[in-house]
């Protein structure tokens, strides 16, 4: 059965709407994948272990911390910077403190500048890989283990990078179910 003029127009319009909706739905995961693969926008990589090769060339890694406007925690790097050889494994700590009287959950987003170094900055382990919950008055040190991939010296855009800044921004998220139930119980007992 062939479609008539108005039916064909409706079918084409529905097809365009479905196609555009599908592309919009796929855009966020595709962009996330693209940034992780290429280091675009300062997105770091994730590695199982450090490389076997450690170069003599030294790079300075600076650590930056910020928080979203409504995040009540205090958050800062324990050490502001470290000098390390390219390929060497580094371990840095960030400190978080919950000054409130209730548990607060947080998640950290991160990036690296200059952006050209993003694809060569590899994390082996990081507090940013999972959500964090701090109890009232709790202070913690959270580690990040990382290295700068020796392949950076082969990249014409990144080979002359001497300083890399790793930045984290913590923002508040909903408490996981178990914590949310405890928080409700605590509020009930107060009243």
Image (tube, rainbow, N blue to C red):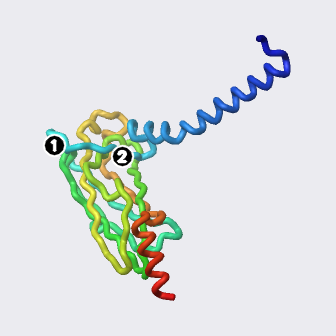
Q: Is residue 154 left or right of residue 42?
A: left
Mark identifier at residue 44: 2
Q: Is residue 69 left or right of residue 35?
A: right
Near-viewer residue (185 or 99): 185
Q: Examine the rendered structure and indicate whether residue 180 appears above or below residue 57.
A: below
Near-viewer residue (101 or 178): 178
Dot 2 or dot 1: first in sequence order is: 2
Quadrant of residue 56 in the image? top left
Q: Do callouts 2 and 1 mark residues in contact (Cβ within 8 Å)?
A: no
Q: Examine the rendered structure and indicate whether residue 139 appears above or below residue 62.
A: below
Residue 165, horizontal then vertical, whole percent: 36, 55
Q: Examine the rendered structure and indicate whether residue 115 appears above or below residue 166.
A: above
Mark identifier at residue 95: none
Residue 45, horizontal then vertical, whole percent: 33, 43
Q: Examine the rendered structure and indicate whether residue 46 appears above or below residue 166.
A: above
The residue pinned by badge 1 equals: 54
Residue 15, horizontal then vertical, whole percent: 69, 26
Q: Residues within 10 Å of mark 1 (few under 14, many from 20)?
A: some
Near-viewer residue (154 or 34): 34
The residue lying furthest to the top in this view is 1
Q: Which residue is pictured at 29% across the width and 39% down the height? A: 152
Quarter in which the N terminus is drawn: top right
Residue 173, horizontal then vertical, whole percent: 47, 63
Quadrant of residue 182 in the image? bottom left
Question: Secondary structure under badge 1?
Answer: loop
Q: Residues within 10 Å of mark 2 (few under 14, many from 20)?
A: many
As measured in the structure, the alpha-carbon distance from the residue carrying label 2 to the one carrying label 1 is: 19 Å
């Amino acid at each position: 059965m062939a479609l008539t003029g108005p039916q064909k127009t409706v079918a084409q319009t529905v097809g365009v709407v479905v196609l555009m909706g599908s592309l919009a739905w796929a855009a966020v995961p595709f962009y996330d994948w693209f940034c992780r693969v290429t280091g675009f926008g300062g997105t770091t990589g994730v590695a199982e272990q450090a490389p076997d090769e450690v170069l003599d060339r030294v790079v300075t890694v600076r650590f930056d911390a910020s928080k979203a406007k409504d995040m009540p925690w205090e958050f800062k790097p324990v050490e502001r910077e470290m000098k390390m050889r390219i390929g060497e494994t580094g371990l840095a700590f960030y400190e978080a403190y919950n000054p409130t009287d209730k548990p607060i959950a947080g998640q950290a987003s991160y990036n690296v500048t200059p952006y050209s170094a993003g694809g060569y900055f590899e994390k082996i382990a990081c507090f940013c890989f999972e959500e964090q919950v701090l109890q009232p008055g709790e202070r913690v040190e959270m580690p990040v283990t990382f290295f700068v991939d020796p392949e950076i010296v082969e990249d014409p855009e990144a080979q002359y990078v001497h300083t890399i800044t790793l930045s984290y921004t913590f923002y508040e998220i909903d408490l996981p179910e178990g914590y949310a139930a405890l928080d409700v119980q605590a509020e009930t007992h107060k009243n």
